[in-house]
Image: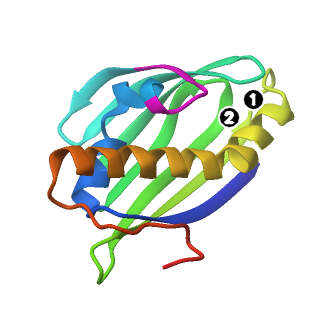
Amino acid sequence: MAGAEQSIYVGVRPETLFSVITDYESYPQFLSDMEDAKVVSRDGSVVEVEFTLNLIKRVRYTLRLTEEAPNKVSWSLVEGMFKRNDGSWRLVEQPDGRTKATYRIELAVGVFLPGAIVHRLVGQTLPATLEAFRDRAEAQAIEKGPGFVDEAGSEDSP
């Protein structure tokens, strides 16, 4: 099993970032490896979404996501090529108005999924994924106005 946790500071309030995280069907617009994201069902704060990634090979899986607005989204695997895909986003507003976003993921591969894909998902693409969500949230905040904070950076620059 492979796992990772990483944080990034985003120049928006948690509500703004939460809205980007929970707009699942827009993921292909700003996540380079994401081919498709389709909401399969929604029951209140529980959503099932089918994702299709194009990495070394095409990977399709469905997650059950639980939304706890505006500070947390957690998920678990419903079906797909993984044995396990569990994780969460935790969003904590900082005194300066930015949000510390912590992304955690635990993946276990299925029989037909090469370890190289899992390594890429967990290790190599995580920083780029966090930056893509940060950039998307900050761009939307600029367009919409309220909630935007001038400076944002990685965990190294709180």
Q: Position of residue 110 (x, y in %)?
A: 75, 29
Q: Position of residue 94 (x, y in %)?
A: 33, 78
Q: State the colouring used for the structure image.
A: rainbow
Residue bearing the label numbered 2: 83
* Residue 68 seen by the camera: no
Amino acid type, mark 2: Lys
What crowding class fits label 2: few (fewer than 14 Cα within 10 Å), some (14-19), or many (20 or more)? some
SS at mark 1?
A: loop
From what the image shows, is residue 108 above or below residue 138?
Answer: above
Residue bearing the label numbered 1: 110
Point out the tag, 2 or 1, that comes first from the N-terminus.
Answer: 2
Q: Position of residue 39 (x, y in %)?
A: 33, 22
Contact? badges 2 and 1 (CB < 8 Å): yes
Is 31 a magenta residue?
Answer: yes
Amino acid type, mark 1: Gly
Q: Name the residue at 78% across, 32% down.
A: 117
